Amino acid sequence: MATNYTGGCQCGDVRYEVTGAPRRLIACHCSDCQRQSGSAFGMTMVVGESDFRILQGELKTYTSTSDAGRGKLAAFCPRCGTRIYHKPEVRPGFVSIKPGTLDDTSWLKPDMHIWTSRRQPWVVIPESVETHERQP
């Protein structure tokens, strides 16, 4: 797996890079991720904060409370609204990048599914993948 990744927002105003291997690739089925993604779940690529940097553009932020009751800072492009990353208070020192914003998404395969108690009934999760009914 590569250790250098680049990505950006839909309109191209924001560009970023990640230097270092992802710690986890998580599919989250909580209602917040469903709402934010407009889909059945959201995906998160956890990387060290020191391995992530914005190359171009400015981000706006929004702070919300997760389904687990914890604070979560969300950063997005102010022009097109693309969510770039989250910083959950439960993971200091890490950034949770929205992996759909990567330039190359062909290798993405979640290694964990969380909040499966809220997953849509038609979503099938492989038995070989780690799962949690709530936030681990």
Image (cartoon, rainbow, N blue to C red):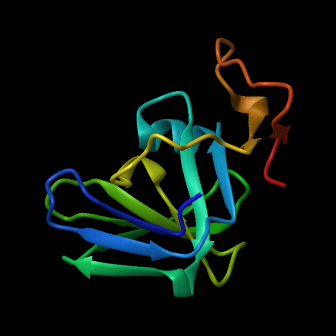
Seen from this angle, which residue lies furthest bottom? 50
Any part of residue 73 in sight = no
Q: Position of residue 96 (x, y in %)?
A: 55, 64
Tell which of 51 and 113 is nearer to you: 51
Which residue corresponds to the image point at 76% horizontal and 33% vertical from the top-left?
Answer: 116
Judging depth in this view, the residue of 14 and 79 nearest the camera is: 14
Quarter of the picture holding the C terminus = bottom right
Residue at horizontal 54 percent and vertical 87 percent from the top: 50
In the picture, residue 6 is in which quadrant? Answer: bottom left
Position of residue 88 relative to residue 36, above or below, is below
Q: Position of residue 102 (x, y in %)?
A: 38, 54
From this view, report whether residue 3 is shown above or below residue 102.
below
Q: Is residue 9 left or right of residue 21?
A: left
Near-viewer residue (44 or 88): 44
Left or right: where does residue 96 sit relative to residue 123?
left
Q: Residue at x 27, y 74 (%)?
A: 59
The quarter of the image holding the N terminus is bottom right
Residue 10 in view, yes or no: yes
The picture places residue 32, in percent across and down from the top left corner, at 55, 45
Vertical placement of 22 versus 109: above or below?
Answer: below
Q: How many marks?
A: 0
Locate residue 13: give its quadrant.
bottom left
Nearest the eye: 94 or 63: 94
